[in-house]
Amino acid sequence: MRTLVVLRNVQFIITVVKGHPNSLQQPGYICKAGDLTSAIFNNPSAAVTTLYQRLFNNSTKFSGSLIMGHNKVEISEQLLKGVIFRLFGYFIGKFWLFVYRIGVSSDKQLYYADSGFKSSFMYSIGKEKQRVLFVQEINTKNSIVNMYQDFELWFTYVGNNPNNVWQKIDVLQKYRDIDIFGITLWNYHLRKFTLASIQWNEFFIKWYNEIKRVIELITSLKKIYLPDYIFNEREMRAWRAILNHAGCVNITPYTKEISPLEANKRGHDGKRRILSIIAKNFSYGVLMEKLKIAQGSIFEARKYARANSPGCIILEKPIRKVKRITPKQQRQFDSFFQDKVHVIMNSYKTNAKTGKPVIYLKNTKNIL
């Protein structure tokens, strides 16, 4: 991946490479401007900032993620184009398991996993609580678990299957071996809460073969259950958990079987949230007459809609931390925002408090 950005009329090209001085597995970043090339860093901010300061002999710093345009929808769409699988993870006990490659087979003992399946997790072992990376994989002949510490291979265990290989390892014995591998989402989430005979994988196969990617959960689940089957709440929570860990997202605030008002009562200030859906569509008089509510409730619902969008979950306020900047940082800040290469100065609008002209930051990202 390469990103071109223009800073002070100079083209900076940021390239993502495999590995950096601290790790051969993690991505590295190189920045090039003309005949100058930076060293390989473990983050894009250091790569572009180092070369910029070297080129212009100043102490200006940049956010690498913003420079590379990760906040732009167009660039994100290009990065995700052609990606048919994304890694997903879920908690098993006290650690977070990531599945980043999958393989498909008809082997029920492996829960339909096959060669190419890979997963990993971090876990602390020993009296000194040393952090160890476990990398698990299934190939055509056996199952393998590699243990890494400080990015170096520590031990390798090989077995005929996931159960066999984990019997050779002296840690995490309280977990089922296939659960640790991450090939038993059904077993981990649904086995205790639904019918043992249910063909849960048919749900994902049918969904995959459909043209549309958005489904209504209850309607789709009824296709793999008996016609008169009644879902209970614990079973639905289990289905939502397995879908969430498989990378699916719930795009509705409530299901069709639940009243919107009842669903929102469980949330933050539910009545205000549900009223915000229609508060801006009708006048105060109509709402007060039809719903028998006070004028203040309508005002608060409209205020909620402006802040969070109608009917949406309330936005969490970020934690605000105030820290006084040093005189040197103040000079750097003033110098940056006085440079017309970075900002556009409004010629007629001024700040009411300071009396200084209003300035706008330029968008320097061009192409990916």
Image (cartoon, rainbow, N blue to C red):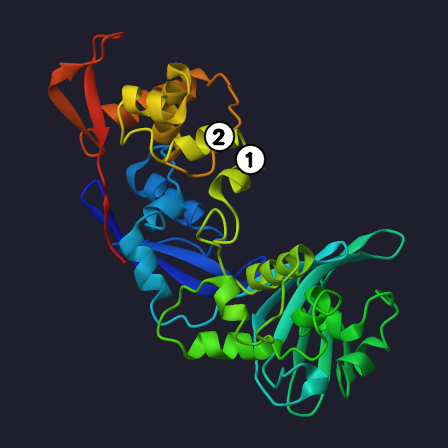
Task: Say left or right for 83 vs 121.
Answer: left
Q: Which kind of residue does numbered mark 1 sit on?
A: Lys
Q: Which residue is at 62% across, 59% downward? A: 236
Q: Contact, CB < 8 Å: mark 2 with mark 1?
A: yes
Q: How crowded is mark 1: few (under 14 residues within 10 Å), some or many (20 or more)?
A: some
Q: Is residue 112 visible?
A: yes
Where residue 115 appears, x then y in whole percent?
61, 86
Q: Position of residue 16 (x, y in %)?
A: 41, 61
Say which residue label 1 marks.
265
Left of 283 or right of it: where is 85? right
Q: If you read the primary sequence from the N terminus, does the residue marked by circle 2 or circle 1 appear first?
A: 1
Say which element carries label 2. Answer: helix
* Crowding near the residue tagged with mark 2, few <14, some 14–19, many ≥20 C-alpha atoms within 10 Å: some
Give the secondary structure at mark 1: helix
Give coordinates of residue 9: x percent, y percent.
18, 44
Between 127 and 265, the one lying in front of the other is 265
* Amino acid beneath label 2: Lys
Please give the residue where the numbered disc 2 appears in the rendered image: 271
Q: Which of 101 and 296 is in front in this view?
A: 296
Q: Is residue 22 left or right of residue 314?
A: right
Q: Which quadrant: the C terminus? A: bottom left
